[in-house]
Image: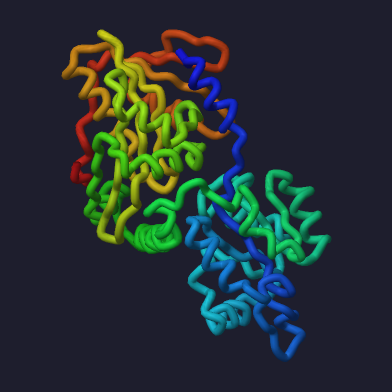
């Protein structure tokens, strides 16, 4: 069951908004002037430093601009900024539809996006259509770096290379589109190496970040601070596991976390989460089966807590596919149990 401490933690951190992507307009926002009307446009003062700083904090960036795509991309390249924007939507569609496309491509929730534009009409259109979006008038650009939602508590190793990891993801996706064969055959070409280990002190900043940033593939939505995670790491009644993945295109970083609570003859999975970027790689199932194997070797019952929300149904399905059976329900809290009679082997396409 949920402890009083965990209830306090979640009440404090549940509503903490985290911006994962800033979407920029171009004309009279990123630069002064209108690209298709003016002979010359110039970058807004301090914008390069702003973009670099946001990037260094692990916040992704993209573009939603009504413009001629090739011309705008060429101008961004001229300014040396093209590489900072993932899945730019430069077209004549509504800004709201462009932002939805970016969110889908990045696989992030709309409420994790901030949109910057100089036109009140565009801001109002987005706010009306997508009320979850944080809309920022270009006049307020100078304040962006000081906004709490733009200041993650820790800048982790994964944060500093997040954009590069997404670029690697784009390469993987392009390779997958061109591949002729089954999904498993494609995965076998990636040379994936998956690692699960006990979390060390140097992992805790990233572990806290994972609990705050991971919403879709998260069994409970519990969020934990560095200090709380460090307590669990050192506790004789808990096991804190962290997972990493890499393949021939590069590292995905630390992408999974599990917190297991020990009792004499019962283990309870208090938290199991996996980054959405590895949803299609099957590693969530590997982590689940690894915990099941550990429980079986220790001859204990294995329970798991699950709290459903509007985003994490995939994790509910994952538990059901792994033969976890619902044995209790208290308000939103579902308790699963696995009899450990069927534990899947690691897929042949993953080195573990």
Q: Residue at x 61, y 59 (%)?
A: 145
Q: Residue at x 42, y 58 (%)?
A: 160
Q: Residue at x 24, y 42 (%)?
A: 195
The answer to which image quadrant residue 241 occupies is top left
Between residues 95 and 120, which one lies in front from this camera angle? Answer: 120
The picture places residue 26, in percent across and down from the top left corner, at 68, 72
- Image position of 179 (left or right of 140): left
Where the N terminus falls, by quadrant? Answer: top left
Q: Residue at x 21, y 24 (%)?
A: 293
The answer to which image quadrant residue 39 occupies is bottom right
Q: Is residue 150 above or below residue 326?
A: below
- Image position of 170 (left or right of 243): right
Q: How is the image coloured?
A: rainbow
The picture places residue 111, in percent across and down from the top left corner, at 63, 45
Q: How many marks?
A: 0
Between residues 16 and 22, which one lies in front from this camera angle? Answer: 16
Residue furthest to the bottom: 39
Q: Is residue 96 visible?
A: yes
Where the C terminus falls, by quadrant? Answer: top left
Residue furthest to the left: 297
Between residues 144 and 298, which one lies in front from this camera angle? Answer: 144
Q: Is residue 78 above or below residue 342?
A: below
Q: Is residue 231 above or below residue 341?
A: below
Residue furthest to the right: 121
Q: Is residue 77 above or below residue 157?
A: below
Q: Is residue 279 visible?
A: no
The picture places residue 185, in percent across and down from the top left corner, at 25, 51
- Image position of 112 (left or right of 283): right
The picture places residue 124, in percent across and down from the top left corner, at 81, 54
């Amino acid at each position: 069951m949920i402890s009083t401490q965990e209830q306090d933690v979640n009440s404090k951190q549940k509503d903490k908004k985290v911006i994962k992507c800033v979407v920029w307009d171009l004309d009279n926002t990123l630069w002064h002037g209108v690209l298709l009307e003016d002979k010359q446009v110039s970058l807004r003062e301090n914008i390069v430093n702003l973009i670099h700083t946001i990037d260094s904090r692990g916040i992704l960036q993209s573009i939603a601009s009504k413009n001629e795509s090739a011309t705008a991309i060429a101008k961004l390249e001229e300014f040396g900024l093209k590489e900072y924007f993932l899945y730019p939507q430069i077209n004549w569609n509504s800004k709201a539809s462009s932002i939805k496309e970016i969110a889908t491509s990045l696989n992030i929730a709309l409420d994790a996006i901030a949109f910057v534009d100089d036109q009140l009409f565009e801001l109002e259109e987005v706010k009306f259509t997508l009320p979850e979006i944080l809309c920022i008038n270009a006049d307020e650009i100078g304040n962006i770096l000081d906004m709490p939602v733009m200041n993650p508590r820790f800048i982790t190793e994964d944060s500093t290379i997040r954009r590069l990891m997404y670029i690697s993801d784009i390469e993987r996706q392009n390779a997958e589109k061109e591949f002729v064969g089954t999904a498993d055959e494609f995965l076998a070409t990636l040379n994936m190496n998956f690692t699960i280990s006990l979390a060390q002190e140097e992992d805790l900043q990233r572990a806290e970040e994972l609990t705050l940033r991971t919403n879709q593939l998260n069994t409970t939505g519990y969020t934990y601070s560095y200090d709380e995670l460090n307590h669990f790491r050192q506790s004789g009644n808990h096991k804190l596991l962290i997972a990493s993945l890499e393949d021939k295109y590069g590292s995905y970083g630390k992408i999974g976390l599990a917190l297991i609570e020990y009792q004499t003859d019962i283990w309870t999975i208090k938290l199991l989460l996996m980054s959405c970027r590895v949803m299609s790689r099957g590693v969530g199932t590997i982590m689940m089966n690894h915990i099941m194997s550990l429980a079986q070797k220790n001859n204990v019952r294995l329970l798991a807590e699950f709290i459903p929300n509007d985003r994490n149904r995939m994790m509910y399905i994952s538990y059901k596919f792994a033969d976890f059976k619902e044995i209790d329900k208290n308000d939103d809290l579902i308790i699963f149990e696995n009899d450990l009679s069927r534990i899947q082997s690691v897929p042949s396409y993953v080195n573990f």
